[in-house]
Amino acid sequence: MTNKKTASKDEVKKRKLFGTDGIRGTANQWPMTPDMVVKIGQAIGYLLQKETQHAPILHRKVVIGKDTRLSGYMIEQALASGLNSMGIFVQLVGPLPTPGIGYLTRTMRASAGIVISASHNPFHDNGIKVFGPDGFKISAAMEAEIERLVFEVDLTQFLPPSKDIGRTRRIDDSQGRYIVYVKGTFPLEYTLDGMRIVLDTANGASYKVAPSVFQELGAEVLQLGDDPNGTNINDKVGALYPQKLSEAVLQYRADVGISLDGDADRVIMVDEKGEIVNGDRILAICALHMKERGLLKNDTLVATQMSNFGLEKRMNEAGIKLVKTDVGDKYVVEEMRKNGYNLGGEQSGHVIFLDHTTTGDGCIAALSVLAVMKQTGKKMSELNHVFEDVPQVLINCRVKRRLELSTVAGYKELIQSVEEKLAGDGRVFVRFSGTEPVIRVLVEGTNKTQISQFAEEIASFLEKELG
């Protein structure tokens, strides 16, 4: 038997489980291996048992949902095992949108909720997102504590006696609960009678619940991406690939198209002319409508650094303040909660209505736009012209190394050179993805040809230096 190498303190410090949206990686590779997931489950379970700020309860319970990835079965069992070993009772709800787990965690009075999903990533990836008892994603401090326990503590010393091991059971009516909850966000005095919708559920978590939401409100629903097989989630369908949806809207003469991603926490829409309605436009449509009715708290919208300058300009014209955060829906939610705002989101389609939900919810966001259509009598194409986009070019380049960009020789000079050429009529924004081995290069400006050249130049440089 060979001796196992013990990790040094420096090596341990370099390890990191959580990114901008939970833990994520290739299934059956670190950290998404069964043994690591068991440890993660034990760490979460230990923290929950240690929790003393709430009134004592007989059994602490955790709700676990997932999307349709093949690896979801493996990770679900490993997580439940780790939690059970710490005395936690687990309730499995099966495939359900991420926001549905936030909702069920609150309403079922669970100590935590966990989603097994890699969101918009391809099937071979998977991930873990953790919600607290309030239905919001856990804090950075709790993420750090979970990492510390996993890497530095022998959790087996805290295992309870055999009689106190937790149990796991399945909840059969979770989908119905979520459907009723989402429908409840749509104005009671309206229906979707007479509306034809093409719905793309990305072969993901919403493939059963989403069509029911819109059908039960009266819409005729034509569905794409509704045949998950474990490996086709997000495969040329869903919010990242709206072109097929656009074609279907034209083919079936639909009033609107709705495209969700794999875990249905984001949405991209299509108007009746086949034109894309991205997250920025959804935010603008809803913000203007809410402001007009006195429902937009503090007359403020929260977006991210990736949002188009055209959105900011339109909001300013309407007397709406636009607050920008770092990229990531959790940063948007943090800003909203901190300052009492109720609408925020991302260009990518995460749209958060804090009056209704604790995280991005594609179905609720889509219903909010449909409500505007009903209340104003306008077609989707009319609403889609809410503002004029400033040209943007976004390039995603895959990299092997994650370095502080300011330390890369020549990077600072390159960015300064591009900014000087833009002469104040644009901007450059470069960041590492928090969920993929990708660096995103965004250049914005008035001349599409020029900014395309600048984006290509920066991307090529980074691929060469970090590839």
Image (tube, grey):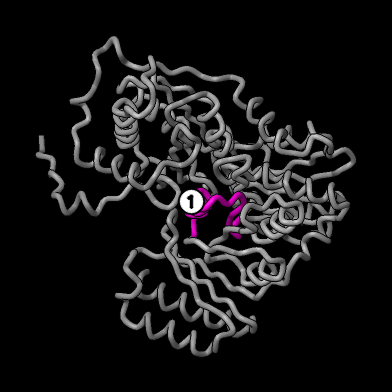
Q: Position of residue 206 (x, y in %)?
A: 63, 37
Tell me if 350 is positioned left or right of 429 in this view: right
The image quarter in which residue 285 lies = bottom right
- Whether residue 244 is visible, yes or no, is no
Helix, strand or loop under label 1: helix
Disc 1: which residue: 338
Query: What's drawn in magenta, residue-wise?
Result: 327-349
Residue drawn at the location 55% of the way across and 29% of the way down: 104
Q: Position of residue 433 (x, y in %)?
A: 44, 60
Pointer 1: residues within 10 angstroms few (<14), some, or many (20+)?
few
Which part of the image, by quadrant, shows the N terminus?
Answer: top left
Q: How many labels sit on residues?
A: 1
Q: Nearer the viewer, residue 293 or 124?
A: 293
Queried whether the magenta region covers residue 335, the answer comes back as yes
Using the image, determine if residue 92 lies above or below residue 403: above
Tell me if 230 is positioned left or right of 218 in this view: left
Q: Position of residue 179 (x, y in %)?
A: 68, 30
Queried whether the magenta region covers residue 165, the answer comes back as no
**What amino acid type should be assigned to the residue bearing mark 1?**
Lys
Residue drawn at the location 71% of the way across and 33% of the way down: 184
Using the image, determine if residue 54 lies above or below residue 421: above
- Whether residue 254 is visible, yes or no, is yes
Residue drawn at the location 22% of the way across and 30% of the way down: 155
Q: Position of residue 282 (x, y in %)?
A: 69, 56
Which part of the image, by quadrant, shows the C terminus?
Answer: bottom left
The image quarter in which residue 346 lies = bottom right
Tell me if 329 is positioned left or right of 465 in this view: right
Q: Nearer the viewer, residue 449 or 370?
A: 370
Using the image, determine if residue 81 lies above or below residue 390: above
